[in-house]
Image (tube, coloured by chain):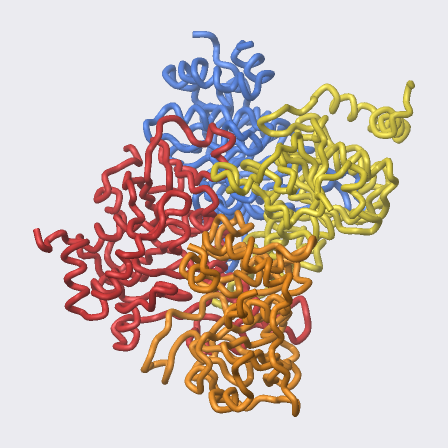
Chain colours: A red, B orange, C yellow, D blue
């Protein structure tokens, strides 16, 4: 079966209750796919962001798709905080695994390497450690009196991301966005949406192969032009800032958030 | 020369703090640190490498978001910047919650890389655009990253300064306290005292923050302002009148 | 000072007694630079191969440049074993840290991450563990009765490798050869030789940037066309098999090896 | 059809051992495993992915040499091949030294990835071109990688078979012993017994290794042979008469 599939078919491997890992805004967020998942009514996701997130996490949380989120930050930078995430944490309607960026990197890299845990300096003395009983401090066995943190590996059921280009075999070119390699390697299966699908084999092109995730990591690839919108795809299009500002205004209230979903996810707004 | 703007004073304070660095990394949405880094890069023939997180055109990383953390772990990043919803008198920063963690009054985005970089980057410059007793507190509600560590905890860096619209504090790691280094033109020690929630050290005479030297100001208003306009158009418009 | 330097100047940062890390044959071996180091009479190197090696290690060992070697294998594949390495191990004239490929990868990746140790499954029950008192078995703190190996990080003084292309700023394009990233990140400083130096900035080229090691990792870059010869540079030229066969014949004896050095390293042979 | 060559019999044995695999990785200088993998790839519409280590044109890795080990750690590699200077009756392999480790009589290149992959890849196929009491021994001088592990040691795989020019042994993990599965055409059980240094299990009647089915042989001598000629010209010339 071809790995290039229509979006909804490509997303079939994502089911309720799974651990879903997604990249940060700079690396390529599969927003069109996220809207499709919300339309499908996905529930009880354990969402892991590598390492931070904005609209994608806020939409999934606000739409009731998320049971647990592990993240180092969810926010909209200078535009403001993430209203649905913030509200859900204050109301206690989601479980939060508060992390720090490199902890999520190291935990996913541990899974990438087939290791049960990752290793990270720092953290000791941060209150994060009190909130993360799953993080353990051991004595570095190669030194004396040198505490160091171990983090359990994160092995997502599915990684979902957006990239500029794929070939028909399902090889996905990601340019500088090496975080997508980490996700694809760490997750049991990966699903990518792409701006463009081309003929030929990206692995045969010396200039492209080094930045291409081989198809054997990918469960499915779906064509989704401007699939990161309203977030940016680095080198291709910028954030749609007016749209994001509009989102933040609406999502300040539950009713406004529902209107946003109707207009931009369920397409049952003014029409 | 036009009168010096407050932002230009701050940029110059940060420029002096990063002197001699080899690689300065700047987080997202940090126009003043970015301008200071570009200024340092332009000023010296062996100026620092500058990497802006999340701006592929202005960073030197090609191994994903992890490369900032990896290269900090390798000891290659000399300067980084953090802010905090709260910053306390012991240099602790809070990027997570106000109130009790289990039932917070306010939730912020999260700790980002602070709980690691605060340990690993030799010179962390704290930057807070609101100087008030609400933000500069005696004790943070939640320690996202601690200002100091016990001697057995591996730590290569930490805060060296806190820069606000009113003043420049240096941080004394051994005492785990801030010291008032200088007060910016137009502000007073009393104003700083009134608006700071933590106790800090100071000498009897606190000097005013020096104005940027003319050559620095020329460079800042010329090539650096032009560079900034491409990345921070709003900031460059307001401060440098470049549109 | 420009990072693009003549070969001998580029190699100035490598000095006696240092830990020098080098890639496997498939990733780009800096053979021209290796010959220059031998001519210079470098001594007491601690050589680390990521993970295996052939001619480069055999030449350095035979020429008396190496005190210690850490490797998972030194040999010439189907052409035969490495005579100078084999002889030195049997005669006990070098210290050998016998490893397995992923152990060297993980120890270098640990240094890349700023960690004091790496983690690796397997190994337990291998006699390698008896020969490596620096490798430690701990109980996985995230499980019960689950022994696992920790490896001390390897932080080389210098990494030395050969790549297809650099720009004048010292950015080095390595294509698929991602091991070179590991080396450049793990080592305190790196030196590359390249087939070609071009104008412009490789980081500005979206297609190239993702496979480019940024200049800030590089101490120096030297132009060395066919600089991997007689080993291959993947995608550019193959192994010079007749030359390697000739080497193995000569290097079977100490006298023959000296003749090889005279002819191909010191250039004081028949001339 | 020409008479079946011994190499073709071996290729077919390996082909059957890798049936159903998703990703077969083949080390350097392994023409028979490579041919078997290409054969499996060509035979089934959902045949395995095949990656030849060190051949960029014939592997699917783009993350450096570590990707073989990482993807094995992730459970994505189903089959790998090893040989050994010595292989013993408990499935231990020796790639390091003959004699005492500190004062070896013979030194081999080294363990390569064996001490890891032997644990992590579900189906390891041992392949030895010399079937003798010198190579197939009761106990190896040095265990580069152990054939079995105590139950508390994490282990996802290990040896499943040993293929030699004389015969096909399967490996019984629970008993830590080889069993003689079949003897190749032209050879006998006695010959195997005479030339094997370790004790092994066998049923009373040991069948001959079956000849490759005609359709398999056609595929092998056609497209697979052509593919092999580009990678292993010497082997393809000798076995398939392709030049």
Q: Can residue D202 be seen in this view?
A: no
Estimate the x, y position of residue D230 in percent, counting from the top left. Answer: 53, 18
Q: Nearer the viewer, residue A7 or D86?
A: A7
Estimate the x, y position of residue D84 in percent, counting from the top left. Answer: 63, 37
A240 is higher (above) or lower (below) than B213: above
Left or right, D118 with respect to D122, comes to right
Q: Nearer the viewer, residue B126 or D217?
A: B126
Q: Point out the residue furthest to the top here.
A: D1
B183 is higher (above) or lower (below) than B16: below
C23 is higher (above) or lower (below) than C164: below
Q: Point out the residue furthest to the left here.
A: A271
Estimate the x, y position of residue C179 in percent, counting from the top left. Answer: 59, 43
B172 is higher (above) or lower (below) than B226: below
**Residue depicted at 58% across the width and 56% down the height:** B50
Q: Nearer the viewer, residue B168 or A251?
A: B168
**Residue depicted at 33% across the width and 33% down the height:** A197
Q: Is residue D221 visible?
A: yes
Task: Give residue B135's quadrant in the image.
Answer: bottom left
């Amino acid at each position: 079966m071809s790995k290039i599939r229509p979006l909804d078919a490509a997303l079939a491997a994502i089911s309720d209750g799974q651990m879903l890992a997604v990249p940060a805004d700079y690396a390529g967020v599969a927003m069109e796919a996220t809207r499709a998942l919300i339309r499908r009514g996905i529930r009880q996701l354990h969402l892991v962001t590598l390492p931070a997130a904005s609209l994608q996490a806020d939409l999934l949380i606000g739409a009731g798709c998320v049971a647990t989120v592990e993240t180092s930050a969810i926010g909209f930078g200078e535009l403001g905080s993430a209203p649905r995430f913030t509200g859900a944490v204050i109301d206690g309607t989601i479980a939060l695994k508060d992390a720090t960026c490199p902890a999520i990197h190291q935990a996913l890299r541990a899974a990438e390497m087939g290791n049960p845990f990752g290793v990270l300096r720092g953290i000791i003395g941060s209150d994060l450690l009190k909130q993360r009983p799953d993080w353990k401090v051991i004595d570095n066995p190669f030194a004396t009196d040198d505490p160091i943190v171990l983090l359990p590996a994160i092995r997502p059921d599915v990684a979902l991301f957006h990239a500029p280009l794929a070939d028909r075999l399902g090889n996905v070119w990601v340019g500088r966005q090496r975080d997508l390699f980490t996700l694809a390697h760490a997750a049991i299966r990966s699903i990518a949406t792409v701006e463009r699908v081309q003929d030929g084999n990206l692995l045969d092109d010396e200039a492209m192969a080094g930045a291409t995730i081989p198809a054997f990591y990918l469960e499915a690839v779906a064509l989704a032009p401007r699939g990161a919108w309203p977030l940016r795809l680095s080198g291709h299009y910028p954030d749609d800032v007016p749209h994001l500002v509009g989102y933040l205004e609406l999502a300040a209230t539950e009713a406004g958030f529902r209107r946003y979903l109707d207009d931009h996810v369920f397409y049952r707004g003014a029409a | 020369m036009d009168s010096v703007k407050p932002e230009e004073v701050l940029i110059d304070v940060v420029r002096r703090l990063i002197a001699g660095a080899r690689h300065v990394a700047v987080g997202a949405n940090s126009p003043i640190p970015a301008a200071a880094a570009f200024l340092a890069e332009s000023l010296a023939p062996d100026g620092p490498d500058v990497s802006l997180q999340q701006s592929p055109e202005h960073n030197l990383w090609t191994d994903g978001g992890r490369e900032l953390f990896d290269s900090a772990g390798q000891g290659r990043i000399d300067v980084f910047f953090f802010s905090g919803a709260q910053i306390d008198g012991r240099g602790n920063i809070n990027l997570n919650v106000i109130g009790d963690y289990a039932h917070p009054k306010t939730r912020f985005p999260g700790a980002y890389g602070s709980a690691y970089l605060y340990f690993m980057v030799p010179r962390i410059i704290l930057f807070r655009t609101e100087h008030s007793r609400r933000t500069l507190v005696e004790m943070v509600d939640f320690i996202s990253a601690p200002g100091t560590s016990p001697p057995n905890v591996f730590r290569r860096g930490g805060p060296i300064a806190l820069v606000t619209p009113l003043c420049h504090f240096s941080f004394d790691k051994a005492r785990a306290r801030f010291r008032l280094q200088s007060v910016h033109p137009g502000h007073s020690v009393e104003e700083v005292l009134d608006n700071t929630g933590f106790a800090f050290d100071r000498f009897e005479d606190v000097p005013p923050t020096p104005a940027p030297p003319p050559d620095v100001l020329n460079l800042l208003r010329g090539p650096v302002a032009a560079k900034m306009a491409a990345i921070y158009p709003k900031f460059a418009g307001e401060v440098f009148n470049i549109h």
